[in-house]
Image: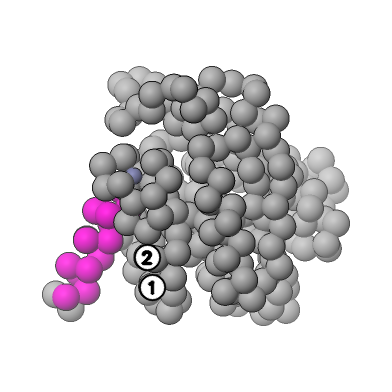
Amino acid sequence: MQNNQSALVLHSGGQDSTTCLFWAKKNFKEVRTLCITYGQRHSLEVALAKKIAYKAGVPFQVLDANVISCLSENSLTNHAMVMDQEKPVDSYPNTFVPGRNLFFLTFAAVIARTHGIKNIVTGVSQADYSGYPDCRDTFIRSANATLNLAMDEQFIIHTPLMWLTKAETWALADELGVLEIVKNDTLTCYNGIIAEGCGYCPACKLRNEGLRGYEELKTKN
Ligand code: ZN
């Protein structure tokens, strides 16, 4: 599709961004990853992101953005807080980190610019359970326009998972030939357990139900 171009992938070591990394590998000639730390619960994520980047044969960069954790109360960075297991009515679960994706995209764009990269890839999905406002397509398009204006650039933010269900994201990983890597080497679980995780946190439920859905579909066909 865009073989002569390069891309920067926001990579957390989770299922979605790892699938995006391999999607980018297929679609761009050169790929590099950026892993941003922000005081989240599990530093294991960074080690996994590094390992996956190594397996993918792409440069890995980690950026310390711990300041994000000082700005708001949320259960991803405040380890004393009990994590919401479900989305409260009329609000967001306390796993929501306000501004996170705007910070991430801004950092990514600045770093992309220093490498002469125009394409930025992020694994956000509007079809997901969470409904975080900064995972929505309108936000991404708006951020894209803002970053282009801010730096007088022509960035293109790619969101390959935007309209995919979790089952479809698993299907994409399989199609890209990396189902086993995504299954075994990624961390999505809010309790910091690699691969299929603890099984009961919201992230695990979503991930595992998606995988079951995809596997059932695959057996039927
Ligand atoms: Zn879990």
Per the rendered image, the range of residues in magenta is 205-219
Q: Quadrant of ligand 1?
A: top left
- Measured in 3D between alpha carbons, the distance from the residue under mark 2 to the one under mark 1, in whole angstroms, is 5 Å
Query: Can you say which quadrant of the picture contains the C terminus?
Result: bottom left
Residue 95: image x %, image y %?
Answer: 45, 31
Q: Residues within 10 Å of mark 1 (few under 14, many from 20)?
A: few
Q: Amino acid at mark 2?
A: Lys
Q: Which mark is residue 183?
A: 2
Nearest the viewer among 191 and 71 is 191
Is 95 one of the magenta-colored residues? no
The structure residue drawn at horizontal position 61% and vertical position 62%, both measured from the top left corner, is 50
Q: Is mark 1 within 8 Å of ligand 1?
A: no
Position of 202 with respect to 58 (left or right) is left
Residue 64 visible in the picture:
yes
**Which residue carries the number 1 mark?**
180
The structure residue drawn at horizontal position 80% and vertical position 43%, both measured from the top left corner, is 149
For label 1, the SS is: helix
